[in-house]
Image (cartoon, rainbow, N blue to C red):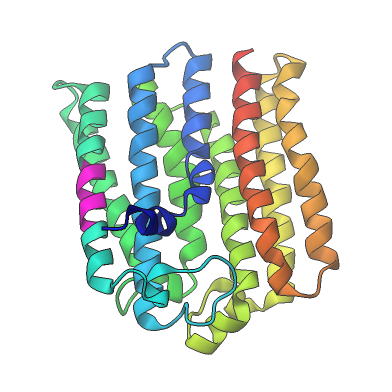
Amino acid sequence: MDVKKYVQAARLRTLPLSISGIVVGSFLAASKNVFDWTIFVLALLTTIGFQVLSNFANDYGDGIKGTDDNRTGEKRLVASGLITPKQMKKAMFLTSLITLVIAVWLIFISFGKDDFLYSLVFFLLGIASIAAAIKYTVGASAYGYSGFGDVFVFVFFGLLSVVGSYFLFAKQIDFTVFLPAISIGLLSTAVLNLNNMRDQENDKNVGKNTLVVKIGVEFAKYYHYYLIITSFLFSTLYVVIQHQKSVQFLYLLAYIPLINHVFFVFKNKDASQFDGELKKVALSTFLFSILFGLGQVL
């Protein structure tokens, strides 16, 4: 087995974005003095497992449907024939199994034997995350092909990631935590929207009806601006509610490259040029998670 091929299929560059919600939820827990390193590490590993599974499933689903035959950007392994569909299915199964074991370990460490209801809820959320990661592009009813990918990213990368990880530490819900969770969800959705704007022509030709295909690139640009601007408003609302110290505004630094990005999208007429912007938005989201979190604990 050529491990390098599977590492390439795992698309490691997507991992910083995927763990941004865990970083924010963990920093918020630390600000409330309920942080635990073991929970943090296991939550990171579980999230990375879900992301790698999603990347494998996307490679497999788009590959067998022919969606990636003429795609722009990173080469996909199933479409190029470097990994067979059967091999990728085995990789998906193994990744699902390992991730589920880590998730169960995380649930046990967090809730122990006493909070059975919480354990059951998070176990079901884990199963739902695995199913959602696979069904994004796999199967006849793949929701990524019918314009619902944005909803998935917002809920799982934003709300579930931030609020769920915070709950693992605190064992209770603080509803103000939903504000930065919405910010992370919106920024993560912006990454998907940018990806879909880049791939709009190819997706339209192969019948992948993303939201961008449905509304067109011009409307998708306005949608993109709203995602980024609204993410700023929700995170700022959280800081204003806390009204404690100026260091909480550290996260504003992450919006400097995002502002430049918005102007680039506004002026650019060639969607293929958006490929280079994906890393900028993803890393800016990760930077936001670090700076926002530090602002809560310093």
Which quarter shows the N terminus?
Answer: bottom left
Which of 109 and 54 lies nearest the eye of the viewer?
Answer: 54
Q: Could you tell me which residue is drawn at 60 percent across and 56 percent down?
A: 191
| Secondary structure character of the magenta stretch overall | helix
Using the rendered view, name the quadrant where residue 171 is placed.
Answer: top left
Relative to 252, residue 35 above or below: above
Q: State which quadrant residue 48 falls in.
A: top left
Q: Nearer the viewer, residue 258 or 68?
A: 68
Q: Nearer the viewer, residue 281 or 121?
A: 281
From this viewpoint, which residue is outermost toward the bottom? 205
Which residue is painted at 49% across and 16% down in the image? Answer: 30
Query: Viewed as shown, does residue 91 lie left or right of 191?
Result: left
In the rendered image, the residue lying farthest to the left is: 113
- Whole-percent x and y of residue 201? 62, 83
The boundaries of the magenta stretch are 93-100
Q: Looking at the image, is 177 positioned above or below residue 214?
A: above
Q: Position of residue 104 (x, y in %)?
A: 20, 35
Q: Position of residue 124 (x, y in %)?
A: 23, 45
Relative to 170, does residue 268 appear above or below in the rendering?
A: below
